[in-house]
């Protein structure tokens, strides 16, 4: 299984070769009306929308946070013999809003988006073919919260695909999906049949008691994620 290589100015990934249909083995097939070209390139876009909450409760003083963001990833796929090359064009945080309120001090504090030291960062690690499916491996890197209490910060886990097998803070992300599925995959044959657009969604939640400096803190976090994946065939190399 080949996972990733890097070229200057471009990031691309190899998918294991598959010889399974003449449609994919040949550049063209034939019909009574003449040759029918098989696509060699595909435009790809992925939109991720997320909304979530977290809470830090000491049985009195507490921290509560809420956030939402939209990330857009774009690139293109190129057929390379029996493999594929995936080029990243752009990965952009289009929207980002966050707020955290804290009563841990005598003067309650409220932090807004501009006060957060970190912003969500999306990483598409690779695309892998398993059987007849193409599966995406990605994650949004965790943030540290509470932002107002850095000495007691814990990882705020953000969306990741099932293929990523994210584990942070002794938390197995996949086992905490409570609704829907974070398996982001599609049959390989579909990208040859025409434009593809698929939506994936899930809800995630985790709660944990933490022993900290002679006290016990209850930490909880949850989020909902919606992904729209679009793959459009083209018959000329993108410029």
Image (tube, rainbow, N blue to C red):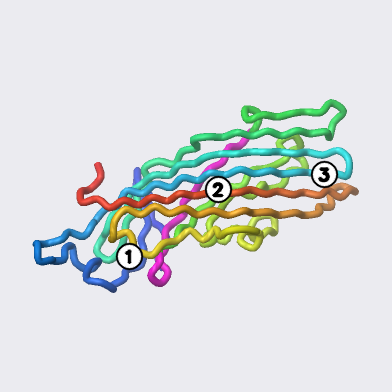
Mark nearer the N terminus (3 vs 2): 3
Q: Which residue is mark 3?
A: 57
Q: Determine contact: label 3, label 1, CB under 8 Å.
A: no
Position of residue 127 measured from the top left corner of the image (x, y, whole percent):
42, 59
Q: Position of residue 196 (x, y in %)?
A: 36, 54
Question: In which quadrant of the rendered view does residue 182 lie?
Answer: bottom right
- Characterize the local packing of mark 3: few (<14), some (14-19) or many (20 or more) Cα atoms within 10 angstroms: some
The residue under the point 65% across, 59% down is 178
Which residue is painted at 46% across and 54% down in the image?
125
Please tell me which of labels 1 and 2 falls first in the chain: 2
- Decide which of 167, 187 is in the foreground and name it: 187
From the top left corner, tell me how far across and down residue 233 is, in percent. 28, 53
Distance in Å between CA atoms under marks 3 and 2: 25 Å
User: Where are the magenta residues, as a range?
Assistant: 117-133
Residues at discs 1 and 2 in contact (Cβ within 8 Å): no
**46 magenta-colored:** no
**Secondary structure at numbered mark 3:** strand
SS assignment at label 1: loop
* Residue closest to the eye, 4 or 136: 136
* Residue 64, quarter of picture: top right
Residue 123 within the magenta-colored segment of the rendering? yes
- Quarter of the rendering occupied by the N terminus: bottom left
In the picture of the structure, the residue carrying the numbered disc 1 is: 189
Label 3 or label 1, whichever comes before in sequence order: 3
Q: Nearer the viewer, residue 162 or 170?
A: 162
Q: On residue 140, which mark appears? A: 2
Q: Mark 1 packing: few (<14 Cα in 10 Å), some, or many (20+)? A: some
Q: Compute the Cα span from label 1 to label 2.
A: 28 Å
Q: Is 42 situated left or right of 227 in this image?
A: left
């Amino acid at each position: 299984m080949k996972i990733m290589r890097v070229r200057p100015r471009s990031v691309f990934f190899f998918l294991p070769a598959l010889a399974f249909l003449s449609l994919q083995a040949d550049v063209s097939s034939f019909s009574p009306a003449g040759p029918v070209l098989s696509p060699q390139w595909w435009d790809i876009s992925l939109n991720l929308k997320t909304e979530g909450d977290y809470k830090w409760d000491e049985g009195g003083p507490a921290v509560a946070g809420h956030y939402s963001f939209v990330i857009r990833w774009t690139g293109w796929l190129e057929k390379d013999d029996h493999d594929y090359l995936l080029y990243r064009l752009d990965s952009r945080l289009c929207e980002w809003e966050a707020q955290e309120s804290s009563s841990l001090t005598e003067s309650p504090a409220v932090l807004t988006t501009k006060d957060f030291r970190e912003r969500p960062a999306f990483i598409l690690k690779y695309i892998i073919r398993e059987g007849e499916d193409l599966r995406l491996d990605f994650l949004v890197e965790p943030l540290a919260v509470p932002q107002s209490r850095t000495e007691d910060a814990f990882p705020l886990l953000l969306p990741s695909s099932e293929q990523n097998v994210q584990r942070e803070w002794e938390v197995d992300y996949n086992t905490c999906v409570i609704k829907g599925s974070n398996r982001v995959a599609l049959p390989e044959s579909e990208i040859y049949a025409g434009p593809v657009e698929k939506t994936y969604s899930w809800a995630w939640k985790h709660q944990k008691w933490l022993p900290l400096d002679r006290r016990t803190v209850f930490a909880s976090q949850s989020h909902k994620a919606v992904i729209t994946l679009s793959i459009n065939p083209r018959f000329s190399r993108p410029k």
